[in-house]
Amino acid sequence: MNFFPVEQPSDSGLVIRGLQSPQRDLPLLVFLHGNGFAAGVYLPMLQRLAEQFDVLALDLPGHGRSDKPASLPGWNTVAEMAHSAAVNTGLLNDRQVIGVGHSLGGVLTLLSAHRHPQVYQSLILLDPVIFPKRLLLTMRLIALLRLTSAFHPHVKSTRRRRKNWPDHAAAFDYLHGRKIFENWTDEALQSFTRYALTEVPDGSVTLSCDPETEATFFASLPKGLWQALQGIRCDTSLIMGEKTYPFAIQAARTAERLNSNVSYRVVTGGHCYMQENPSLAAKEVIRAVNNAR
């Protein structure tokens, strides 16, 4: 199924762009992507989901085709920007809305749904980066002491990341099999090189999300994360990859214990299992939606 571009200003005035499927008055999935990615990176999974749902997939500020703010606001503000842009499309009116998000996008979806409980009927969070309470306290102390670059495992490496290639094919060849991309399907990696890269005037391509923007997200933290996990009132499924960060599975287990509306499930794959096996990821989302009804 073909997706087509959508754009809408958020309440902040920043233009949020993304993709949407043809709207057929089906339940609507509102999807937010992971840090450094873009909505289109997930098309192999989203196209499968569009067989049963209408889909609105947004690029976060500074990612994909969305505007980049002069300075990146915090996670909670970015969540509100994405939420307001989704509402401003008019697609959320008078229908079942299901919030879906991966990694960073999963946390932002949770924060939005907690703040706007009247909008979302259920949430499916794909390997959300949920930090245990003790780890959050440690990370806040590290940030307060301005030691994030030295101690955070992703900040320094992200800032050093290569971001330019002669063309899309060169980017595909370079990224194929590297680090987080090593188990991705070719279809998923092609989606990354198409939607997470931007052509520049000389014909070369560059990462749409500048490494500094990605590192800024890694170096910052959401506010009220555990208040949202403990307070969320709609059915919330956390679908974790078995090879993801151990702290994330630990946090998902704790969240399930603290809130009867939250459940977690472990599936085959790593943090980006939806790029490793898009069909499996789509089936897991459909299963979670059906179980929530």
Image: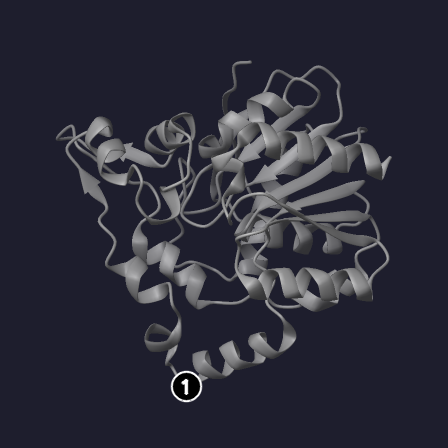
Q: On the picture, is 24 further left or further right than 173?
A: right
Q: Residue at x 37, y 63 (%)?
A: 154
Q: Quadrant of residue 25?
A: top right
Side (left or right) of 193 relative to 279: left
Residue 278: give x, y in percent of width and height.
54, 30
Residue name at image x 41 percent, y 86 percent: 145
Quadrant housing the C terminus: top right
Q: How is the image coloured?
A: one colour
> Which corner quadrant of the image does residue 107 belong to?
bottom right
**Looking at the picture, how far across and down is residue 41, in whole percent?**
44, 33
Q: Is residue 89 visible?
A: no
Say which residue appears at 69% left-offset and 41% top-offset: 99
Disc 1 element: loop
Q: Which residue is found at the position 66% from the left and 37% from the top?
A: 87
Q: Position of residue 185 (x, y in %)?
A: 42, 30
- In this picture, residue 42 sits left or right of residue 21: left
* Residue position for label 1: 145
Q: Is residue 102 left or right of residue 256?
A: left
Figure label count = 1
Provide residue 215's location: percent of width, then percent of height.
37, 60
In the image shown, does 118 or 212 lie closer to the viewer? 212
The quarter of the picture where the N terminus appears is top right
Q: Is residue 68 above or below residue 54?
A: below
- The amino acid beneath tag 1 is Leu
Label 1 packing within 10 angstroms: few (<14), some (14-19), many (20+) = few
Against 54, residue 207 (above or below) is: below
Establish if 80 lies above or below 27.
below
Say which of 71 and 162 sits in front: 162
